[in-house]
Amino acid sequence: MTDTIAAEQLANPDTRVLPADPRTRGIALELLQEVAALPILSPHGHVPAGLIEADRAFADPATLLITPDHYVTRVLHADGVSLSELGRGDSPADPRAVWRSFCARWPLFDGTASGLWLRDELVELFGVAVEPSAANADELYDVIAVRLAEPGFRPRALLRDFDIEVLATTDDPLDDLSAHAALAALSDVPTRVVPTFRPDAYVSAAPGFADRVDRLTAASGTSADHAGYLGALRTQRARFIRHGAVSADHGVRTAQTLRLEADEAARLFDRVRRVDAAESDRAAFEAHMLYESARMSVDDGLVMTVHPGVHRDHHPPTRRAFGPDTGHDIPFALDFTGALQPLLEDFGTAAGFHLVLYTIDETTYSRELAPLAGFYPSVYLGSPWWFLDAPDAMLRFRRATIETAGFSRTAGFVDDTRALCSIPARHDVARRVDAGFLAGLVAEERLSLPAARRAIRTLTDDAPRRVFKL
Amino acid sequence: MTDTIAAEQLANPDTRVLPADPRTRGIALELLQEVAALPILSPHGHVPAGLIEADRAFADPATLLITPDHYVTRVLHADGVSLSELGRGDSPADPRAVWRSFCARWPLFDGTASGLWLRDELVELFGVAVEPSAANADELYDVIAVRLAEPGFRPRALLRDFDIEVLATTDDPLDDLSAHAALAALSDVPTRVVPTFRPDAYVSAAPGFADRVDRLTAASGTSADHAGYLGALRTQRARFIRHGAVSADHGVRTAQTLRLEADEAARLFDRVRRVDAAESDRAAFEAHMLYESARMSVDDGLVMTVHPGVHRDHHPPTRRAFGPDTGHDIPFALDFTGALQPLLEDFGTAAGFHLVLYTIDETTYSRELAPLAGFYPSVYLGSPWWFLDAPDAMLRFRRATIETAGFSRTAGFVDDTRALCSIPARHDVARRVDAGFLAGLVAEERLSLPAARRAIRTLTDDAPRRVFKL
Amino acid sequence: MTDTIAAEQLANPDTRVLPADPRTRGIALELLQEVAALPILSPHGHVPAGLIEADRAFADPATLLITPDHYVTRVLHADGVSLSELGRGDSPADPRAVWRSFCARWPLFDGTASGLWLRDELVELFGVAVEPSAANADELYDVIAVRLAEPGFRPRALLRDFDIEVLATTDDPLDDLSAHAALAALSDVPTRVVPTFRPDAYVSAAPGFADRVDRLTAASGTSADHAGYLGALRTQRARFIRHGAVSADHGVRTAQTLRLEADEAARLFDRVRRVDAAESDRAAFEAHMLYESARMSVDDGLVMTVHPGVHRDHHPPTRRAFGPDTGHDIPFALDFTGALQPLLEDFGTAAGFHLVLYTIDETTYSRELAPLAGFYPSVYLGSPWWFLDAPDAMLRFRRATIETAGFSRTAGFVDDTRALCSIPARHDVARRVDAGFLAGLVAEERLSLPAARRAIRTLTDDAPRRVFKL
């Protein structure tokens, strides 16, 4: 690093994101030590298996860190930078220009979770210990670009460096899983890369549903009727399990569930395949399929994860121009207590059934999720999701749920990211927040130090292994 | 205590559950001192009067601390222990086996409110200063069992030891209150034990309503029509008042209220007595009766407490097998602003009317409850209820309401428990959280120390006496 | 001050409302220093322009500080003081009696935001460094009355003393703005006093709507039909802009918006002018006019501020006896994500459009407002409003939004007050809370000190200038 870019030092890697009070910080450091040697378990995320199979060098700093990450591009967009300028349009943007635009706007990320992760990546991966700025943008670009060309920066090498023991991808039920099969056969892949069954497109009765169902049943060798449809889902789940899948993920609009008799369900299935299906029928079908997905998980053992409560593509013009996952998915208020009652009445105490609930509506933490997880053996608290994957929000999550449900009912941290390089930073922040939270309980004499040591191991390692059946 | 169970020390009785910052902790200790000598006032709870009248020795550690406490059994149930194994089924469980199961799972309670209370009870009541475990379960069992056999551990002796000045029970309107009468006549009962009028079964139009109304009117010597029904409720309230009752408690599904003309109400009453009553009629009737209950409180002076927003018996199979209050009552989102408007329009400024509002939906604290209590002379903020009766949640309650409503609008702490032995622990935690909260305000120079002394006396003693008319 | 009233010292002006932890407090003081010399920007409030134009002495302590401030009178009302006794009725109350009543009840304000502001005003404006009480009420009254008679305590002198650079009033669209014109022409007014266009009465289809529309179109010289109505609103907005207005404020019941074709809108306009207009039509019209107001802001550049979610006049008897703004406006749960979607779909990325969203429903902070402001270039986070304009609530706001949206998406502090003398106290508390919040981030190594310096300048000065186009 030259003098010109050494002006503003980034945070100390050891003590960052820890409580201010010296005694509490000391306890937190001790607790962090307890889990320092533990590997990363990533049982839910969006890194493509093909990226690891191909194992190619990353193209450049902007294509690695900016353009594909909607956590980052949305902040720049809010500041007036168009998504085209950030390389999301049809014609590619100059990566160096994208990078300059990002560096010049670095203060936008002050205080944000993305800012913490980016800062951590700069320090840990690229040895950059200064704040990006318009002045040092080109120099940083070059420093990073050199690093990206090194063999040690290929995906598989990173997985080893990051000490990622398990990495779950998220996959379409008709994905051939060839990348997963290839990786399983290779000897130089240090990580267990497992697929996740994500049936959204085939259980949500959105336009095009009938065609998707036809493709599903055709690929599964089942009839195209309701029984064949359910059979096809079971067939593909079984195929995923053979490829190592441990969970099925459900990105539903709400958490509503609905119990239906078989003939009633079959008639509903027929109605929602029509192009003019009623909105109420579509909603009922989605609720029913969430219920049926629980039954399938009870039968085949796949952990059921649910991610509800997001208005996807809030700004249709952006969706039309730039596709989905472009930063305008906006959460809304959610109900779990009533919505999940039918499912939990029938499957809530089923042996081996694991249901992990995620939310971006924090109001449900103390009101619904902790009480549910504090009674039903099947229900687990998913880690703070998306906008809530940030220090203050994570602390609120712990404070709103532990008092009711204890440490054993949490499913551990998931990074939920497609940005491979951010995985260590995300897990690091989560561990630091947990250490700070637990240290606070010890300092306030609400938890003994031995119990806190036990708890941080539970949260970091035992819980994800046990809940996700790793 | 032998060496084998001295391994993990429990918390210091003096400094537990206090802020970490040394200066803030010092102020908190000073504030605690201010209320150290004050008795416990328990104006709402569920200890049966018959327990105190009988004054028998408690059977054994499990029957005292585990089996009847749904705060405790639900956590064990979530971990996979069936309620039968915990002694909740038809055939009794071996109490020592229940106790072993609990001790082996002690870490489940780390960080929970129940864990704090249990820890406190072990230390204060049984001199057990170590964490329970599978290894020391039998030894702890024997230590506690010996203590339970001592005369000083009978209910009345405990009431004296605990310095409980007032203890309210919760009673069916047709309860003969003979236990209360007997206790009032005894000279060795140190505590004023008062009944609470809980009319839920007679104002909620659930199945069996007509029969219950018939029993109510028959017992009250009134006609079985609408006028007689209302008269019967008033008659029983008057009887409760003669037995010392200070409040009427309403465990309604929502806080909805409805003003109806007398003839309209009479017709609704007729409809909801039918077995095929419409769901909308039942809801309207319940809302109307909440409104009418306010009118009765205005007339007879009973403090009106409202506990809404819980989906009772969320898991019907457990209800069928083990009865109500078995750990699966789950809160949901609640509205007070619109729901209470008719009631408050007519009775909100009525002289002497006290309406204490409880919630498990924290979102209503700053949004609705504090603004309501900050204007209506009748409205008081109930203490954090049920799942929220825990340090972090209590702190959130204070922080969300005091800035708008001040200290004078809170009704003081209620323990709301059927577990007699947990009463001192619950009040102790509440006082410590308040002391810590107030000490924080002093340390941040938002409140003077004299004002904080005033406030902790208000919260601990003045408020419950004044609001509950003790 | 005599000895009799020196008993209880009020807080230190330098260190009040700052974090307890010494190191964090030190950083906070450093950050406060960064903005100490910056003027007050007040881009939204309710001080009448006529008060400044008239520039008369304030009548007495009670008329200045108690009677007109519904933040204060509501707290006294909840304690049983009638609004008549506080001077809000038809016959004026003795100001000294009002003042005594207030001083005797000073502890009611302990821990409240109003208590902080009043304390600050007593110290800073009147040199009163003791807590008011029944004993010192008369003495304090006299001390303050003397000060009020001084020329240095006239409104214009106060504006200079307070260093208020910009002060926005809130005005009816048909206000002649003569006071604003007069002030603009005067050389001794140190503050830019600008009107704010508040069209509520003309866009909410409440009873009397047709008459108000007729007055609006007549005053604007447009036709009385739908096109004329819209034209009249545009005409008056243009007039406000000529008088210096920078924003239009919308005190709507909900944030619902609705896109309608012109002919459909015209038919709805005709229906809601009838006295028997349907409730659903009124709601649709209000939603449509919120949408159309956005279009007007896109066209003429007025910043659009929205204040939704309050049940106005919750206690109709008080409204009938004492008018609006008498302390019983109660918030309720709110949705922004779905409600604003039509507006944001069409105008969310429009050049130069600024939409500042306020809420009293804190649940929307992390769930909806921060994600919206973190994508749409037009959306800004309004400062904590009304009951939330208090230290703990402000801290919750920062913690719930900054992690998602960063510092650049906030619109800065607005005092929203009609109490001129409370303006410096309100801004001071806000700056202290921000300094404490930022110092915490620095102490926890989540933000560098240079970034924190940058942030406090953004929040205090850059953001209000930029967002409100000052």
Image (spheres, coloured by chain):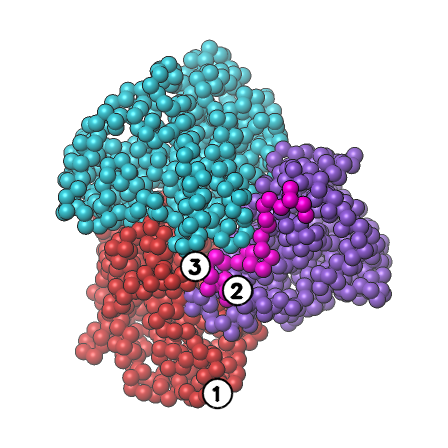
Chain colours: A cyan, B purple, C red
Query: In screen coordinates, is A67 left or right of A358?
Result: left
Residue B330's x, y, as percent?
60, 43
Identify the mark nearer the N-term, 3 or 1: 1
* Magenta stretch holds residue B20: yes
| Marked residue chain, label 1 | C
Majority secondary structure of the magenta segment?
Answer: loop
Q: Relative to A383, does residue B174 appear above or below in the rendering? A: below
At label 2, the amino acid type is: Ala
Q: Residue furthest front?
A: B3
Q: Residue at x 84, y 58 (%)?
A: B178
Say above or below: B95 vs B297.
Answer: above
The reply to whether dot 3 and dot 2 touch (C-beta < 8 Å) is no
Q: Nearer the viewer, residue A229 or B41?
A: B41
- Please name the amino acid that badge 1 sits on: Thr
Residue C465: horizontal and vertical position, in percent?
Answer: 24, 60
Q: Residue at x 63, y 59 (%)?
A: B427
Which residue is labeled 1 in the image?
C4
Q: Secondary structure at mark 1?
A: helix
Span shown in magenta: B1-27
Helix, strand or loop status at disc 2:
helix
Q: Which residue is mark 3?
A: C393
| Res. B27 in view | yes
Per the rendering, the mark at residue B28 is 2
Task: Measure the alpha-carbon separation of dots 3 and 1.
Answer: 36 Å
Q: Please tell me if label 1 and label 2 are on a single chain.
A: no
